Image: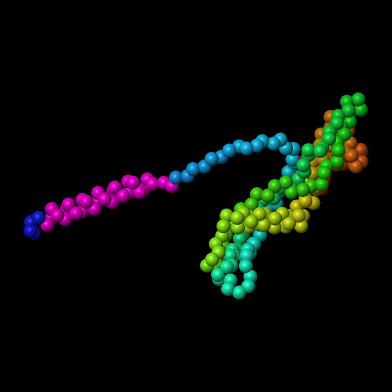
Amino acid sequence: MLKNAPSFFALLVAAALGGWLTYQYFVGRHQGVENASVLLEKIETVAKLTTVEGQFSEVYNYSEYEGYFTFLWDKKVLVRVRATVAAGYDLEQLNLVADPATKTVRMSALPEPKILSIDHTLDYYDISQGIFETFSPEDHNRINKRAKDLIREQAEKSNLLPAAQEQADKMIELVRFMVESAGWKLEIAGRSPLGIDGTRMKRMRHGFFPS
């Protein structure tokens, strides 16, 4: 009996080692399977000018039920929203006309600046669900929409839109400088047809734009 003990233990160790190697071979190479179908549904031509971007964050506390026995029905979650908001101009209605006879470029006035896009992400914290209520896909869609609306409201109250207009004014001055450097003049509806004076042109040649 004792004579066969080393052989028995060696066989046991070999079997255990073989099982471990087999497990590592199959399990170690196991990867999750993902399936996705990405379809291009529509292409639209746009003419939009983004002049500024702002970084925003918001903490949003969502609670669906208030009253007695909230532990039975209430669904609540703390959401942190982080977003990049782009502001600028929709140039679909912008008109540009060049008159070679008078060497004049006539441009319609820019529209009011507006928010062009909101790229946001949500981080969920402190999720609490009632015994008889759980979060549904519709709840997540509603939270996502409300979070985006909160960011839009915050952006509209900030100085993002005035900053977009200020940056657009600088770009218009650059366009005017380029037009007048070619011997033409730029006329913008609602603005003085006079060109840039010598001091401002000198500053622009050195890379300084009027604020």
Residue 2 vs residue 43: left or right? Answer: left
Q: Residue at x 92, y 41 (%)?
A: 192
Q: Which residue is drawn at 8% across and 59% down?
A: 2
30 or 167, nearer to the observer: 30
Q: Residue furthest front?
A: 132
Q: Which residue is rendered at x = 64% and y = 62% of the image?
A: 60
Residue 165 coordinates in the image, percent (x, y): 80, 47
**Between 40 and 65, which is closer to the camera in this rendering?**
65
Q: Does the magenta stretch include residue 48?
A: no
Residue 161 left/right relative to 187:
left
63 relative to 35 in the view: left or right: right
- In the rendered image, the residue lying farthest to the top is 101
Q: Does the magenta-highlighted stretch encompass residue 27? A: yes
Q: Which corner quadrant holds the N terminus?
A: bottom left
| The residue stretch that appears in magenta | 5-32
Question: Looking at the image, is 66 positioned above or below residue 45?
Answer: below
Residue 74 shows in this picture: yes
78 shown above or below 105: below
Residue 183 in view? no
Name the residue nearer the viewer: 210 or 24: 24
Quadrant of residue 74 within the rendered picture:
bottom right
Majority SS type along the magenta span: helix
**Is 133 placed above or below 35 here?**
below
Q: Position of residue 30 (x, y in %)?
A: 38, 46
Colouring scheme applied when the structure was drawn: rainbow
* Number of marks: 0
Residue 182 in percent (x, y) is at: 84, 29
User: Image quadrant of residue 126?
Assistant: bottom right
Name the residue rendered at 17%, 53% in the picture.
10
Residue 70, position as x, y percentages in the image? 58, 71
